[in-house]
């Protein structure tokens, strides 16, 4: 397993150097390395590494969300409160609604199957978006109007909303007893609890750091360990109390920045170094999940439904930004920043197929949903990453 990981790291670093030379975002190259080395093409990745790919992706996501929290200030969040809230669900509703409407005619799915597909496609990828927003915040691009903070916060909330909606639809479809009212109420509850628990954890960590004054490296290790345990707790209590552990992770960083800025800068510097490796692991593992043969099974119909969904999503994004001080270029940047799909689609794209098998239902619709989900990663992750990198430099002051 270690030799396989070493090969991925070496090849990915060479590819990132090459892509930087030709001015294409590095993560696009890393993603293609994962696809190329994955089990569906060259099959060069050790199966034992693929077995723990979910845990590796989660660890890398924790690193980038901790960095995001350590860059968030109270003033910037206050400026983007209302539009961030609207962006967390309106674009997803627009996109999901469009996919639901078109799925029966283009893909031969039922309305409910189309709704399941729409809920999967409705999630933006924080793994793609957040690193760019952190970079722009450090470069002071768009920070006067809080644009990177807006996209960063909204994309994190968007995933909470989409995953809850997906769980409702798949539960109804497979005949499970779903309490829709409680599930919908769980969205604000999980967000509020996630933030509250993260702030409490941040307060406790600050007290520990003040008393024992561990070195910055030890602080990072403690921070990572606490974040992982919060996600573990989320899975343990999700049947009774919903809370968004990934939001807790961001809230920890936010609290430390607010109360102990010197700690925050030290931790952010250390995490930036860890991210060099974590980024490679995250995107090679995401790329390894991409089955090109399955993706192309949806064919032209799959491409059409993805593009139609993105058009609807863009309209929802513009609606969410009505009344803000953003000019047309800045609004267009937010639209582009809301294009990439990767982590959520890789994580739950195959879940409907598995649920249908367990329920002894026909699996054809599940295979179609998986194919379109995979195709959405191939089309939108590289396109969105390139679009964010180019327009961010040109359109953000």
Image: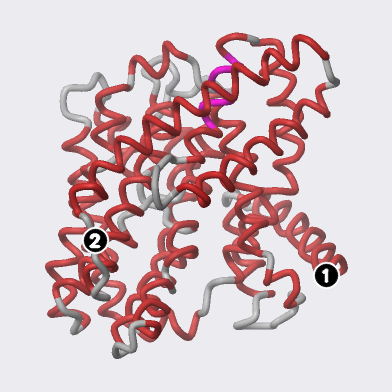
Which image quarter is the N terminus in? Answer: bottom right
Q: Could you give the CA–CA distance between mark 2 and mark 1, rounded to whole angstroms?
A: 41 Å
Which image quarter is the C terminus in? Answer: top left
Q: Nearer the viewer, residue 140 or 208?
A: 208
How far across and down, in percent of the image, does residue 270 sit? 76, 30
The segment highlighted magenta reads 250-257
Dot 2: element: loop
**Per the image, is 271 magenta?**
no
Given contact means CB atoms under 8 Å apart, are the residues at marks 2 and 1 in contact?
no
Left or right of 375, for residue 72 = right
Residue 370: mark in rendering: none
How far across and down, in percent of the image, does residue 238 sit? 43, 49
Q: Farthest front residue?
A: 240
Residue at 22% x, 68% y: name it. Answer: 172
Residue at 51% x, 33% y: name it. Answer: 248
Q: Which residue is mark 1?
A: 1
Q: Which residue is mark 2?
A: 178
Name the magenta segment's main secondary structure: helix
How far across and down, in percent of the image, does residue 104 sit? 14, 78
Q: Is residue 292 visible?
A: yes
**Per the image, is 251 magenta?**
yes
Q: Is residue 115 above or below residue 396?
A: below
Packing grade of label 2 (10 A; few <14, some 14-19, many >=20) is some
């Amino acid at each position: 397993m270690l030799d396989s990981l070493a090969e991925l790291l070496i090849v990915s670093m060479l590819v990132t150097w090459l892509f930087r030379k030709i001015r294409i975002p590095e993560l696009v190259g890393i993603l293609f390395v994962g696809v190329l080395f994955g089990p569906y093409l060259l099959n060069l990745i050790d199966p034992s590494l693929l077995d723990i790919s979910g845990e590796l992706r989660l660890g890398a996501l924790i690193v980038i969300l901790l960095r995001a929290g350590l860059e968030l200030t109270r003033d910037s969040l206050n400026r983007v409160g209302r539009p961030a809230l609207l962006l967390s669900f309106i674009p997803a509703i627009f996109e999901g609604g469009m996919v639901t409407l078109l799925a029966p005619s283009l893909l031969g799915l039922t309305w409910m199957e189309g709704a399941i597909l729409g809920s999967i496609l409705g999630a933006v990828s924080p793994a793609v978006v957040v690193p760019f927003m952190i970079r722009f915040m450090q470069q002071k691009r768009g920070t006067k109007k809080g644009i990177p903070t807006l996209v960063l916060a909204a994309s994190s909330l968007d995933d909470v909303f989409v995953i809850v909606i997906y769980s409702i639809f798949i539960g109804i479809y497979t005949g499970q007893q779903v309490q829709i009212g409680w599930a919908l109420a769980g969205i604000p509850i999980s967000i509020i609890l996630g933030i509250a628990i993260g702030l409490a954890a941040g307060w406790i960590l600050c007290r520990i750091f003040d008393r024992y004054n561990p070195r910055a490296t030890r602080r990072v290790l403690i921070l990572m360990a606490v974040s992982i345990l919060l996600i573990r707790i989320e899975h343990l209590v999700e049947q009774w109390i919903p809370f968004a552990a990934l939001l807790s992770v961001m809230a920890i960083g936010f609290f430390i920045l607010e109360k102990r800025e010197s700690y925050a800068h030290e931790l952010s510097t250390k995490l930036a170094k860890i991210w060099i490796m974590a980024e490679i692991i995250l995107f090679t593992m995401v790329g390894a999940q991409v089955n090109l043969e399955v993706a192309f099974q949806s064919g032209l119909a799959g491409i059409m439904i993805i593009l139609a969904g993105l058009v609807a999503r863009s309209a929802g994004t513009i609606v969410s930004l009505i009344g803000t001080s953003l000019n047309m270029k800045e609004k267009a940047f937010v639209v582009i920043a809301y294009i990439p799909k990767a982590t959520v689609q890789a994580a739950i794209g195959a879940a409907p197929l598995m649920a249908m098998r367990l329920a002894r239902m026909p699996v054809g619709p599940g295979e179609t949903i998986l194919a379109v989900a995979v195709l959405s990663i191939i089309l939108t992750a590289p396109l969105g990453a390139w679009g964010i990198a180019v327009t961010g430099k040109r359109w953000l002051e």
